[in-house]
Amino acid sequence: MTSELPADARALSTDLAAAVGGEVRFDAAHRAMYSADASNYRQVPIGVVAPRDAADVEAAVAVCRAHGVPVLPRGAGTSIAGQAVNVAVVLDFTRHMGGIIGIDPEARTARVQPGLVLDTLRDAARPHGLTFGPDPSTHNRCTLGGMIGNNACGSHSVAWGKTADNVHALDVLTYRGERLTLGPGEPGPEAGGIPGALRDLRDKLADDVRASFPDLTRRVSGYNLDQLLPENGFDLAKALVGTEGTCATVLEATVRLVESPAARALAVLGFPDAYLAADNVMTVREHNPLTIEGMDAGLIAALRAHNPLETASRALPPGGGWLYVETGGATREEAEAAAHAVARAMKPYGATSVVVSDPARMKALWRIREDGAGILTRSPDGGEAWPGWEDAAVPPERFGAYLREFDAVLERHGRRGVYYGHFGDGCLHVRIDFDLLTEPGIANFRAFMTDAADLVVAHGGSLSGEHGDGQARAELLPRMYPPEIIAAFEQFKGIWDPDDRMNPDRVVRPAKMDDDLRIFVGMPTLRDEPQLAFAHDRGSFTRATRRCLGVGKCVTASGGVMCPSYRATGEEMHSTRGRARLLFEMANGQVITGGWQSPEVADALDLCLSCKGCKRDCPVGVDMAAYKTEFLAQRYKGRRRPASHYSMGALPRWIRMVDKLPARVVDAVNAAARSPLAAVAKKVGGIAPERAIPPIARRSFTAAFRDQQPRRRHRTLRDDEQAARRGSRGRVLLWPDTFTNHFDPVIADDAVVVLESLGYTVELPPRDVCCGLTWTSTGQVDAARKVLLRSLRTIEPWLAAGVPVVGLEPSCTAALRADGPELLPGEPLAAALSTGVHTFAEVLAEHAGELSGAVVVSGQKALVQVHCHQHADLGADDDKAVLAALGVEAEVLDSGCCGLAGNFGFEKGHYGVSMACAERVLLPAVRAADADVAVLADGFSCRTQLRQAGQREPVHLAQLAARALGLRPNTR
């Protein structure tokens, strides 16, 4: 397979482009990005079309029909069974067909387009006290069309059912171009066409359907032939739900909305193990809760190993298995009382409990459960786990017994799995450590899958409880249904799609479950000799490219830090998922054929801000900043680099040269940076012409500190304690990073004053030090190693003595903590600094009580922009604690990266995206803030973005602390 399209595909692309108003993309990059969903499977599509409206869809399908090529309607691409990948023309509805046509609060219905994101509908319905009941964990990116295709359920299915239970009508298009509006109602005896053919099929097979379909709320496997029965109203809309795009394309849907409780509470029940949690779900169901979700201890262990900064799991009650039981009420007190009632009722069954009704705490707890699919795909040592046997369901009264026998099947096949799921509905989610890299491993995978299928059928269950059959389980359907039902499925599809061109080889006449496994068919051909250590991926870059499993948390419109450029552009190639898939395809060389010189990968990574948000926010821990560094290092090895790599990549070196100049010369340099000469300098240096060059301080902090050191006064919080407290807390080494030292030295001055006031003796390295971040981010790994190693040797005496190192610039502090071991994996000094470096807030947080009692100026309010590297590697809990101790009323913005991101926002061609990132949340929030509200931005990039956007002067935590403690004048 190559990236070159055959002549007929080129003709197809030309005809589609002429007929369709939306984007038509047959390039290698888009074919590579759409070759996988969130499953184990890989199928390279023919091309991708993003229709603008229903007319575009009709035109696209007509062209495909004329060329005889298959069609695959697709939502967010988060399907776990492989139904969202195929050798077909993909119709991507997320770009343009994601609107709400209307909401009828009285009828409690909504008309929607298929690309509508679920949370957008829920947000629109909320003012009416309504919601859409099914809510998969992907609710902030999954689409209504995808949910209809999969018959999705979610955590509230015990209260509101699955998607089929909440669809009222569908407007669909068949491959042959027929438009139908579907809903309930028996067709008349004279009816022909599709409704008449389906009626005839029903009449022939009604008794077989009644006898063969399990009585199970979570029966998702197979087609919904039961919805054709008279007792179910011959509902063609519900019958089409769950057909996985194999029958028709949904153009519009009318869905049912349900009343949403005004308030909710969460009872978290702890049991000795997950078996006992499962044994007790029927008792919990008697209380009619909104949800009954379960988790195994393995999920919590994986979460804490994946994200050491995670704190929400500490709120769980003691146990080895947990149930989340959500209750609702008209008031918070009513919801909380219902949750307490559940907790009391379960106490005789040995359950410990915690009841939470604060929305923020509930959201944090729910995130543990929602991130499960991603968290469990990787163990801390880089071990891999996969979907496959992902979401089988059994009657909930048999769930405990099923779990015990399922674990026995795992053991018999030598496999391990950690699970969670919708325990109240008997639905289990599990990621298993299948070996999908070798032929014996794949044979073991097949053997396990067949045994697991037989087990679930023996318990009266369904192979799929919400994710569908796809390629993962459709081959196993004959183990669940008798031959006459399997034949009926084929007839059902044939009525809708007689040409078998709608997402073929899925559900009926399926591809084998062990074919097209993306890891096996996409084995890397690229030499795997990375420049970085990739310690979490066992030293392998190609293993790192497998980390993304497509759960798609990066393709959301808001929340968290991850993927600011995706949110600015809306393009898949600028998401973490899109970039990871391109890197995976680059490594195997089948579609992306250029290796390290691949223009497709270079284009995708060009707009990566290296913000590291994905490292923290991605459930699988994809670290695109590290992947970009590796790509740049390999791409430009022995080659001429872009001008910005020489100018901004080596910034600390140039700044040190300026520092040696007299103040009047520095003034002249700054003046030149504001003159017409700056345009020439920016052009030569690869700097965006729209950017101003930040002014350099007339004198660096380190130069001034060393001159003043013999005369420094070690201030304490109270003058009468000065003699007793001077240096009483011991020594700290302040890390004078390039940005603070040479651009904002006043911050370091204030930090020293505060630290000395607490009794610390502040020391500096004898010469300039650098973390190497600017070289690292531009892929100059060899230079970064040399710079960091020289700095480590400079401060070796302090490291040997165990003296804490204090960083003021978050990006540099994060680099010392996380990047150093990646650059110098065998260097003990790098390991020592990684554990020995502390943020300014981490030091102050140890004295929160003391600070609180020493506040002189109180009542300050602040908007807080957390630096993205701090979010990823350091966390902000200590910052929040310090602000509270200082009496600062802080609002922490959930705005993501400021958009400047070190050298990114200064590089030519990036200004528009950089400012679009800032305009999402940060800049509007600052404009809306009252004049007396401080804007706290510890990162130099964040402060520079705010300054150059013409906003108020931002401050650092050290400055706020110095003012609050009366050590500096209050200038707010």
Image (spheres, rainbow, N blue to C red):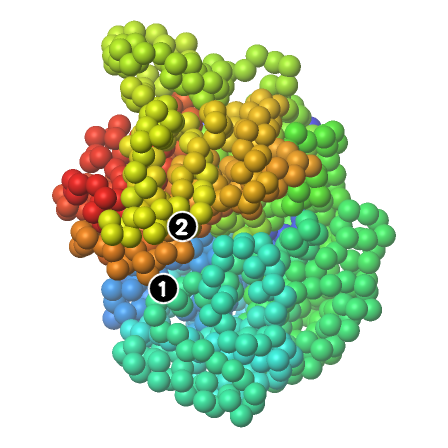
Numbered label attached to residue 360: 1
Numbered label attached to residue 295: none
Q: Is residue 619 left or right of residue 547?
A: left
Q: Are marks 1 and 2 in contact (CB under 8 Å)?
A: no
User: Is residue 194 placed above or below 561 in the rendered structure?
Assistant: below
**Looking at the picture, how far across and down is residue 809, in whole percent?**
40, 37
Q: Is residue 756 left or right of residue 188?
A: left
Classify 10 Å Cα crowding around label 1: few (below 14), some (14-19), many (20 and above): few
* Number of numbered discs: 2
| Discs 1/2, front | 2
Res. 47 image quadrant:
top right
Res. 484 image quadrant:
bottom right
**Looking at the picture, how far across and down is residue 624, in whole percent?**
54, 38
Numbered label attached to residue 728: 2
The front one of 408 and 201 is 408
Q: Residue at x 51, y 89 (%)?
A: 347
Q: Is residue 118 left or right of residue 401?
A: left
Q: Residue at x 32, y 28 (%)?
A: 708
| Mark 1 or 2, nearer chain start | 1
Res. 707 image quadrant:
top left
Q: The disc labelled 1 sits on which kind of residue?
A: Ala
**Looking at the picture, how far across and down is residue 697, in whole percent?**
30, 22
* Element carrying mark 1: helix
The front one of 124 and 374 is 374
Q: How far apart are the two marked residues, 1 and 2, measured between alpha carbons?
A: 40 Å
